[in-house]
């Protein structure tokens, strides 16, 4: 049953609890939130590698209002956030363990709620979720893949070229010098990886309304203000980001879902920012065109980049299988030309 309505007109939360879940021998932390205990479960899997998500629960609710339609499960995965309280989550950082954790979490949620959850993954969170859905399609009601990492070799080449071109066109000699120093990808070391990510972010390829430093500050503020993270948790979280990246980036460099994932046995909704320079639209379209699935849909957000879930209200449909709707854009127009528009098989979401 629902509680009384909040002042802004939306239902108040009927549940909002921080909980631990045992996955194998390790404890993981989740926060479960929703306005009604009868709403279907939705598991959120954060982008990364290494970023937490429990600290963003209130921001997600404010921007996306997922709790109105779902029982939302925010999960700090292995190597991230609160789950670093268990020392066993600080090791065995590889794709196989991340996917096995996901399958185990899906089993726990199905058993608890009596139904397979909807899964919404962001960036590499979507990639891990897709791997899990391939292994156990019975555990996923619908997969919503937002800015999914599909082809890392192509993505790195695109991101590096974008940042270097932007640096030269804008006359940013510092950026151009640093990018020329690391050279073209692959960027398997933390220094090279971080340099590329910093300048892609600063030139608008990650978020259209925030630089790398602004995004980092927002993360620190959200961790510091969260009721869930102690000072020790914050320190572990920040260290865990670098540790996760060091462990996972070299292995993830071989990711090519077009080649390795011809079929997903669950309905899938792919959501893509037209201005995304991290997981570019060309790769998303290639994967979508080749993919076999019970049903599939590719939805484009015309004025968003990689972290479009932070700038696009209506991102996740209240009834999976229906297209998201965008009522009002928050992101501003990117200053650089958008990539060529992919052909056919798409739903375009234009600003209202």
Image: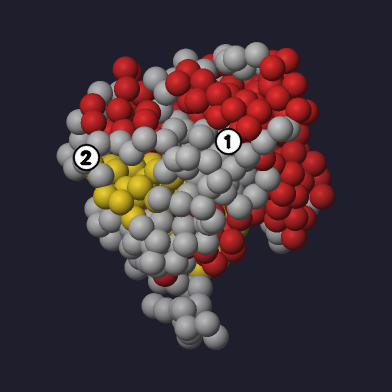
In which quadrant of the rendered image does the C terminus lie?
bottom left
Task: Read off the residue under disc 1.
Answer: 48
Q: Residues within 10 Å of mark 1 (few under 14, many from 20)?
A: some
Label total for image: 2
Q: Residue furthest left?
A: 294
Frontmost residue, 71 versus 278: 278
Question: Left or right of 331: which side holds 343?
Answer: left
Residue 216, position as x, y percentages in the image:
72, 45
Frontmost residue, 95 versus 91: 95
In the picture, residue 128 is in which quadrant?
top left
In which quadrant of the rendered image does the N terminus lie?
bottom left
Up the image or down, 351 lies above or below 188; here it is: below
Residue 135 appears in the picture as rendered: yes
Task: Read off the residue under disc 2.
Answer: 344
Q: Residues within 10 Å of mark 2 (few under 14, many from 20)?
A: few
Give me the residue at 52% from left, 33% from top.
278
Frontmost residue, 22 versus 257: 257
Q: Earlier in the sequence, mark 1 or mark 2?
A: 1
Give me the residue at 45% from left, 72% from top.
35
Residue 322, position as x, y percentages in the image:
25, 57
| Real-space CA distance between mark 1 and mark 2, rounded to the nearest whole angstrom | 30 Å
Residue 41 appears in the picture as rendered: no
User: Can you tell which of label 1 and label 2 is closer to the viewer?
Assistant: 2
In the picture, residue 77 is in which quadrant?
top right
Residue 115, position as x, y percentages in the image:
30, 52
Secondary structure of the residue carrying numbered label 1? loop
Secondary structure of the residue carrying numbered label 2? loop
Give me the residue at 65% from left, 14% from top.
183
Residue 338, position as x, y percentages in the image:
44, 40
Label pair 1/2, CB-CB below 8 angstroms: no
Up the image or down, 68 lies above or below 7; here it is: above
């Amino acid at each position: 049953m629902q509680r009384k309505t909040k002042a802004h007109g939306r239902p108040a939360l009927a549940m909002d609890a921080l909980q631990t879940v045992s996955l194998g021998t390790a404890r993981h932390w989740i926060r479960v939130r929703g306005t009604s205990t009868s709403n279907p479960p939705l598991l959120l899997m954060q982008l990364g590698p290494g970023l937490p998500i429990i600290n963003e629960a209130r921001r997600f609710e404010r921007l996306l209002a997922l709790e109105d339609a779902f029982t939302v499960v925010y999960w700090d995965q292995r190597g991230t956030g609160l789950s670093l309280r268990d020392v066993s989550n600080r090791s065995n950082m590889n794709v196989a363990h991340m996917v096995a954790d996901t399958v185990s979490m899906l089993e726990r949620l199905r058993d608890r709620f009596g139904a397979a959850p909807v899964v919404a993954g962001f960036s590499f969170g979507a990639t891990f979720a897709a791997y899990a859905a391939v292994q156990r399609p019975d555990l996923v009601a619908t997969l919503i893949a937002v800015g999914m990492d599909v082809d890392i070799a192509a993505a790195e080449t695109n991101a590096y070229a974008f940042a270097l071109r932007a640096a030269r066109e804008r006359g940013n000699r510092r950026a151009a010098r640093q990018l020329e120093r690391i050279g073209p990808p692959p960027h398997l070391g933390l220094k090279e990886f971080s340099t590329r990510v910093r300048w892609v972010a600063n030139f608008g390829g990650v978020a259209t309304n925030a630089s790398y430093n602004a995004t980092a500050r927002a993360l620190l503020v959200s961790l510091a203000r969260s009721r869930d993270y102690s000072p020790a948790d914050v320190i572990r979280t920040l260290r865990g980001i670098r540790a996760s990246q060091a462990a996972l980036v070299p292995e993830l460099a071989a990711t090519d879902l077009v080649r390795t994932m011809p079929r997903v046995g669950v309905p899938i909704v792919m959501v893509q920012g037209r201005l995304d320079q991290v997981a570019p639209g060309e790769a998303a379209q290639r994967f979508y065109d080749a993919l076999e699935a019970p049903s599939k849909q590719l939805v484009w957000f015309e004025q968003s980049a990689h972290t479009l879930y932070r700038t696009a209200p209506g991102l996740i449909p209240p009834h999976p299988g229906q297209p998201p709707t965008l009522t009002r854009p928050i992101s501003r127009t990117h200053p650089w030309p958008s990539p060529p528009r992919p052909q056919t098989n798409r739903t375009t979401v234009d600003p209202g």
